[in-house]
Image: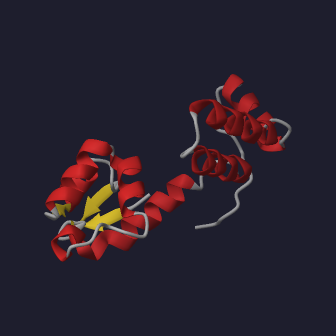
């Protein structure tokens, strides 16, 4: 997840230097925002605004420069409201499954789900849902 100041710009200007984007620039960017958008950024070398970066999925939120850390910490607080094992395994499933086939990704997801099933937080979460009440999950981080 990413937050940027409204004054931020993003670019891949390497072609203007006679080289291609390296350190994964030609591989990560298309995976993040799609081939067509990535090609426009890579081939033109023209910077895009923070709002454009948000609109194409490169970042999550745009805010004023003074609020960037506050918004980032609020995102982190919201992301850690879930059960710690569920947060951990969701991150693992997304990260490990990102660059494999859908079949392999579904296997990774199933394996991570299997880690969750026997936990107390899963039982509590399901019971709370059925009883129409908030779940009382263990928390890994205190904000």
Is residue 125 found left or right of 114 in the rendered image? Answer: left
Q: Nearer the viewer, residue 9 or 87?
A: 9
Q: Is residue 101 above or below residue 50?
A: above
Image coords of residue 138 (percent x, y): 74, 53
Residue name at image x 65 percent, y 35 percent: 104
**Residue closest to the eye, 63 or 44:** 44
Question: Looking at the rendering, which quadrant does residue 134 occupy?
Answer: top right
The residue sitting at 39% across, 61% down in the picture is: 2
Residue closest to the eye, 48 or 86: 48
Asked whether residue 69 is in view, the answer is yes
Split into 4 quadrants, where in the image is the N terminus? bottom left
Vertical relation: 89 (above or below) 72: above
Residue 6 position within the rendered picture, expressed as x and y whole percent measured from the top left: 20, 66
Residue at (54% x, 45% y) in the render:
98
Residue 43 in the figure: left or right of residue 57: left
- Residue 125 at x, y percent in the picture: 72, 36
């Amino acid at each position: 997840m990413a937050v940027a100041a409204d004054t931020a710009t993003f670019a891949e200007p390497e072609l203007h230097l006679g080289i291609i984007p390296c350190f994964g620039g030609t591989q990560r960017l298309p995976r993040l925002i799609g081939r067509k958008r990535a090609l426009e950024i890579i081939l033109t070398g023209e910077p895009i605004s923070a709002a454009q970066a948000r609109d194409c999925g490169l970042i999550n939120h745009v805010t004023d420069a003074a609020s960037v850390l506050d918004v980032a910490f609020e995102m982190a607080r919201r992301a850690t409201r879930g059960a710690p094992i569920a947060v951990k395994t969701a991150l693992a499933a997304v990260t490990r499954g990102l660059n494999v086939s859908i079949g392999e990704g579904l296997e990774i997801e199933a394996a991570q789900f299997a880690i969750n099933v026997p936990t107390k937080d899963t039982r509590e979460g399901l019971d709370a849902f059925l009883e129409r009440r908030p779940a009382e999950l263990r928390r890994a981080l205190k904000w």
